Image: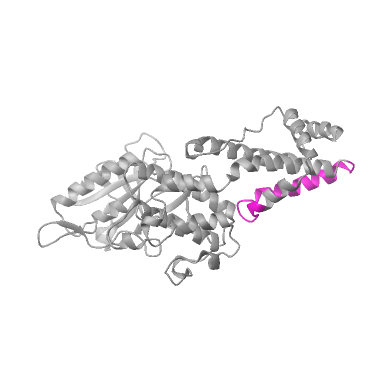
Amino acid sequence: MSENNSLIGQTLRQHYKIVEQLGCGGGFGETYIAEDIDIPENPKPQRVVKRLKPTIKYQQVQRLFEQEGQILNRLSRYDKIPTLYAYFEHNQEFYLVQELIIGHDLTTEMSQPWSEAKVLNFLSEILEVLAFVHQNGVIHRDIKPGNIMRRDRDQKLMLIDFGAVKEVSNIVVNSQGKSSSTIAVGTPGYMPVEQAQGRPQFASDIYAVGITAIQALTGVTPRNFIQDELGEIDLQKLAPNISEKLANFLTKMVMVNWRQRYSDAAVALRGLQGNIEPISGILNWILLKITIGLICQYKNCDFSIFQNCLQLFVDRLQQNSNSVNYEFYKTVSMSLLKAQEKIAIEYRNQIGGSFPTIVQYSPFHSEQKRENLGWVNRKISQLRSELKKSIKQNILEVFQKILVVC
């Protein structure tokens, strides 16, 4: 792009002052950061401005851009999709103005393979967002690690860069005067066969999510995936230690024939939550029982020994999303003595029953699931802080009472 064609320093619609160029999106155009000078705040809030440059200017392109703008505006009301502030035409080019997400995309997190626990959490969260997209009749068409951002302020996943808008830049007119796209929208490796052939389905997005999950789990990029003699991804060779349930789920997501995949994100989400025990729910009970196990084990020892062991456990628990296998917690939990369950009940009573109730989650309990997991995470962080200060007095009193019961 020539310097004379740069938008830096210009103000669009007397509203958005371009201050920085983020990158060039090929046929899509360019992406910039702009200050919203119409907002009476200092510093001025920043927005992302995307400049679309169609290869041919004609009425059909304008109409398609208007339609896609309306779709993005509707989708952006969802908290995990960037807000669309404006879409307009200027000097025979098209512009989108969107929320600037402060965070990082998932490519930065994939330098090392993820644990199954982290992959499961990723699948649950991104499929929930995608279910909303599909329920609005929209196919994303370009899901990949670079188009999934983790927002800094709350660590939530954000789905960005919908492929439908990119199609506006690739429209041409055939000899009969009808519009068509010059290239398939998507990214090789994450784009299934039917999408590459110009026939995307909701199941095409499912494929892309599955590919992303396998990449996260294995640390292998899609171009290096092992395939069997039928051209299907050989997950057992890529991830020989994967649990059977997760392997079955991912295998169905990435079948070559789109009709053999989950039909849309809502169906996939039900499959995930029906076949794999929710980590956030069982983590509550496991944390409780292992803590009681440590109390029982060290009840006759110096309390500092118990404190150190509990600290060690909390450290390992905090690493759950990165390195500790989910099956470890389940195995340890089930191996605890039956007698400890009675003490666990006493433990619950002593702390006022503040552990949230464990429910059988479904796609319609997603908010309750997030609240429960958030509570456990906060409790772990709180406990860690207290242990570093030799355990605050009120926690110590609870433990001492249980030690008496033991």
Question: Left of 19 or right of it: where is 212?
Answer: right
Q: Determine if residue 46 is in view.
A: no
The residue segment tinted magenta is 300-327
- Which residue shows up at 27% across the image and 60% down it? 198
Q: What is the x, y in percent for residue 126? A: 46, 48
- Which residue shows up at 47% across the image and 46% down it? 269
Foreground: 370 or 48? 370
Assess whether residue 205 is covered by the magenta stretch: no
Q: Main secondary structure of the magenta part?
A: helix
Foreground: 395 or 23? 395
Foreground: 166 or 339? 339
Q: What is the x, y in percent for residue 211? A: 45, 59
Q: What is the x, y in percent for residue 383? A: 71, 39
Note whether 39 is above or below 6 in the view shown: above
The quarter of the picture where the N terminus appears is: bottom left
Give the image quarter of residue 236: bottom right
Q: Determine if residue 295 is in view.
A: yes
Q: What is the x, y in percent for residue 287? A: 70, 42
Question: Left of 399 or right of it: where is 102?
Answer: left
Give the image quarter of residue 396: top right
Give the image quarter of residue 188: bottom left
Q: Residue furthest bottom?
A: 229
- Which residue shows up at 41% across the image and 57% down it? 207
Assess whether residue 312 is covered by the magenta stretch: yes
Task: Tell me which colouring the rendered structure shows.
Answer: one colour
- Which residue shows up at 24% across the image and 60% down it? 4
Question: Left of 229 or right of it: where is 49?
Answer: left
